[in-house]
Amino acid sequence: MNKLYDSPRAALDGLLRDGMTIMSGGFGLVGNPESLIQEIKASGMKNLTVISNNAGADDFGLWHLLESRQIRKMISSYVGENKLFEQQYLSGELELELNPQGTLAERIRAGGAGIPAFYTRTGLGTVVAEGKPHEEFAGQLYVQETWLRADLSIIKAWRADAHGNLQFRKTARNFNPVMATASDVTVVEAEELVEVGEIDPDCVHTPGIYVDRIVRSTINKKRIEQLTVRPRNHRIRG
């Protein structure tokens, strides 16, 4: 089975439709599938539910789909400095399901593992737990959370081979690997395409069985969301 595609547009051909749910990898501005996001924008698909750690920043990441009003609902854990996200949410244009970050990651992992629900103490006693079942274990109260699954996952990898084995770099590994397991179809854009066997088996973070389509990424910007520098006249005392 050939998993390699010539372009991001070809890699998404036949997969997009109005009202679908999409998982989009990335952590902050790291590991965002920029090339695939641009093709989703170009498709004009509307009323999307997007599951992602964040919604990008000005002119970067999922911000583009917010700007084009293609996202109806975000399921995420961090809204950051995204003013467009804030405006759309406060105006009622955008529905938001906000999750504690660890809970979001575990809900996605559970979706990939076939676990429909689990219990956690995170969020107990807050608005996060309102309306959800509670259960006592070993004298402690827990709140039930349900899995997350999607119609499509769009993933950004550092390296991929033709079988779909993936390797991620550093922070990009936070959400991309679990999202690759939790959807009906997984499309990957990779910075580097390598020969089968070139990725050391011990360095394969996502096995190819979870990957349906692969394309070389066309956008590889490395942006910093918050840059903090030391004043020039600062001296380090030994």
Image (cartoon, rainbow, N blue to C red):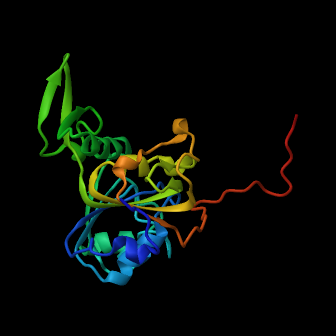
Q: Considering depth in this image, is 28 or 33 the residue closer to the camera?
A: 33
Residue 64 shows up from this direction: no
Q: Where's residue 138, x and y in %?
A: 20, 16
Question: With respect to residue 99, does 116 lie above or below?
Answer: above
Residue drawn 24% across and 46% down?
Answer: 128
Quadrant of the rendered image containing residue 141:
top left
Q: State the residue lying farthest toward the front.
A: 1
Q: Quadrant of the C terminus?
A: top right
Q: Where's residue 197, x and y in %?
A: 55, 45
Q: Where's residue 83, x and y in %?
A: 43, 71
Quadrant of the rendered image containing residue 69:
bottom left
Quadrant of the rendered image containing residue 113:
top left
Left or right: 130, with 105 as reference point = left
Residue drawn 29% across and 77% down?
Answer: 70
Q: Considering depth in this image, is 104 or 15 the residue closer to the camera?
A: 15
Question: With respect to residue 214, does 107 lie above or below?
Answer: above
Residue 50 shows up from this direction: yes
Question: With respect to residue 231, does 181 lie above or below?
Answer: above
Residue drawn 27% across and 71% down?
Answer: 15
Residue drawn 22% across and 75% down?
Answer: 17
Left or right: 231, with 126 as reference point = right
Q: Quadrant of the N terminus?
A: bottom left
Q: Where's residue 87, x and y in %?
A: 35, 74
